[in-house]
Image (cartoon, coloured by chain):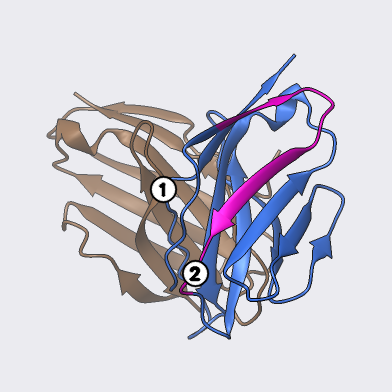
Chain colours: A blue, B brown
Amino acid sequence: DAKTTQPPSMDCAEGRAANLPCNHSTISGNEYVYWYRQIHSQGPQYIIHGLKNNETNEMASLIITEDRKSSTLILPHATLRDTAVYYCIVRVGPSGGYQKVTFGTGTKLQVIP
Amino acid sequence: DTEVTQTPKHLVMGMTNKKSLKCEQHMGHRAMYWYKQKAKKPPELMFVYSYEKLSINESVPSRFSPECPNSSLLNLHLHALQPEDSALYLCASSQGQSNSPLHFGNGTRLTVT
């Protein structure tokens, strides 16, 4: 699976958009971009994933550059509950009936009142 | 609340004890995972079961013994652990043959004394 690079930490004012970048310059054509987050003392939570096109759901938007070498997770109106570590993961689809998900170090997002 | 239930939430055990961690899901998922997470580090994959068969063992010491009695249950048997094995142990499940994400429980906080 492709290696990802994320800033170790970011701050965002409450109510503003949080834009979390991820670099995955070695991504292959069949690899997806996934985002998970982990709020303190909880298990990781899936947020969104995409292959080529931009994606949006009730939690966030995922913007993938045309060359697919980087992506941005956007939380449109950050709240204090969005304070968490955000993990960007790049991987191929399932193989053998499972997905081998490897976490990098992630970005610690602090939402400030 | 998560759809993956882990028990117990906290466990303290001595180095000579034998204990088990339990994980249960009723989403019909056929892949189940154990991760270990040390403080301020990302989760690390330990084991993957697919259709109740062990598919991945990430060179985990034999003092950790996984078991998948059926498609809804996953156990992790612990014996002769060391203090450095103290960590948060996370269970996850996924549908397997799709790009659907992993669903995590909130973990068991294990302390080895």
Image side of residue B109 versus residue A84, left or right: left
Q: Is residue B3 left or right of residue B112?
A: right
Q: Given the image, on which type of amino acid does mark 1 rest?
A: Pro
Looking at the picture, how far across and down is residue B90, in whole percent?
A: 46, 46
Measure the C-alpha gap from mark 1 to mark 2: 23 Å
Quadrant of the rendered structure where residue B30 is? bottom right
Q: Residue A111: where, in percent of width, then height?
A: 68, 24
Viewer-proximal residue, B33 or A77? A77
Query: Chain letter of disc 2?
Result: A
Quadrant showing the N terminus of chain A: bottom left
The lab-note entry on whether marks 1 and 2 share a chain reads: no
Give me the disc on residue A25. 2
- On whether residue A42 falls in the magenta region, the answer is no
Q: Dot 1, crowdedness within 10 Å: few (<14), some or many (≥20)?
A: many
Q: Which residues are magenta?
A: A10-26
Q: Please, what secondary structure does the residue beneath circle 1 have?
A: loop
As rendered, which of A83 and B22 lies closer to the eye? Answer: A83
Q: Between B88 and B78, which is closer to the camera in this rendering?
A: B88
The answer to whether A46 is drawn above or below residue A106 in the figure is: below
- From the image, state whether disc 1 or disc 2 is nearer to you: 2
Q: Which mark is residue B43?
A: 1
Q: Quadrant of the C terminus of chain A?
A: top right
Contact (Cβ within 8 Å) of mark 1 with mark 2: no
Foreground residue, A113 or B14?
Answer: A113
| Residue at x 36%, y 29% (from the top left corner) | B11
Identity, as a three-letter code, of the amino acid under mark 2: Ser
